[in-house]
Amino acid sequence: LADGTGRWKYKASPDGIGESSPAVASGMVFIGDLSGVLHAVDAATGKVVWTYKTAGEIKSSPVVSGDTVLIGSYDTHLYALAARTGKLLWKVQTAGYVHATPAIAGGVAYVTGCDEILRAIRVTDGREMFTFASGAYTGASPAILDGRAYYGTYENAVLGVDLRRRRVAWTYRHPSLHFPFYSSAALSGGRVFVGGRDKMLHALDAATGREVWSARTAARIDSSPAVASGRVYVGSSDGKLHVFDAATGSAVQQFEAGGAVTASPAIAGGRLVIGSQNGRLFGLGG
């Protein structure tokens, strides 16, 4: 992380790794690939610990909850595996691809679906606690805070869903621009930050869904934003990483990556790490 020196590399499937982002826990790195395999790799050595094969490609990112790793597959299932051994603990079938990444809160996994359903599934045993009809195809992953789920849809809306009452608390649609929301939301300071294919980053009031501000880029935003130290960092297909003031939406800085930035920024140890579709990985800051 300090200087970008390579330590090891691990070969997944010949089909490559698609949109799955790695999760790190208990000294292992978990990642899915386009052949449908979830890999558990030793974080220190890059050696495989175990693999598990699903029946469809994996674009969902794994999430680790205690000793359990959860992963969605295009075979329409959400899987729970023992993190140390890869043993199947349970799987739940949906009515469509499981593209999104589950969000964990209070021992429950919340996963949006290509079947237009938000599902609440107990992590310990896979019991489906409830389902909620989103009313639209959803590629974004839910963000959970204080009993609400926030996510965008392909019907050009962002939803704030009350999980206790199992109803939509609010719906946001831009008054004139009607484009899907593929970016997953970030939550900070009572606001929901989410990118749209309308080329804008939107800051919404988490309580009401009212737009506080929006900031324009030159191309659609599929990157999911990250918030740190009062700033919002997000990539755009215009080839730039954009930095905005979280309070006002004013542009603070831009970084030219040289290719579309659909990946999401990761921030740790005084560094921001972001990948570009030109095949380059950048470490910024310091």
Image (tube, helix red, strand yellow):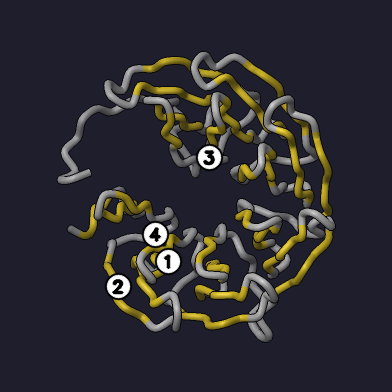
In what quadrant of the picture does the N terminus appear? top left
Q: Amino acid at mark 3?
A: Ser
Q: Nearer the viewer, residue 63 or 16?
A: 63
- Chain-order first, disc 4 or disc 3: 3
- Chain-order first, disc 2 or disc 3: 3
Q: Residue at x 49, y 44 (%)?
A: 19
Label 3: which residue? 61
Q: Is residue 221 above or below residue 41?
A: below
Q: Position of residue 203 (x, y in %)?
A: 54, 75
Q: Amino acid at mark 4?
A: Val
Tags 1 and 4 in contact by the CB under 8 Å rule?
Answer: yes
Label 1: which residue? 236
- Chain-order first, disc 1 or disc 4: 1
Label 4: which residue? 261
Secondary structure, mark 3, is loop
Q: CA distance from mark 1 to mark 4?
A: 5 Å
Label 2: which residue? 254
Q: Amino acid at mark 2?
A: Gln
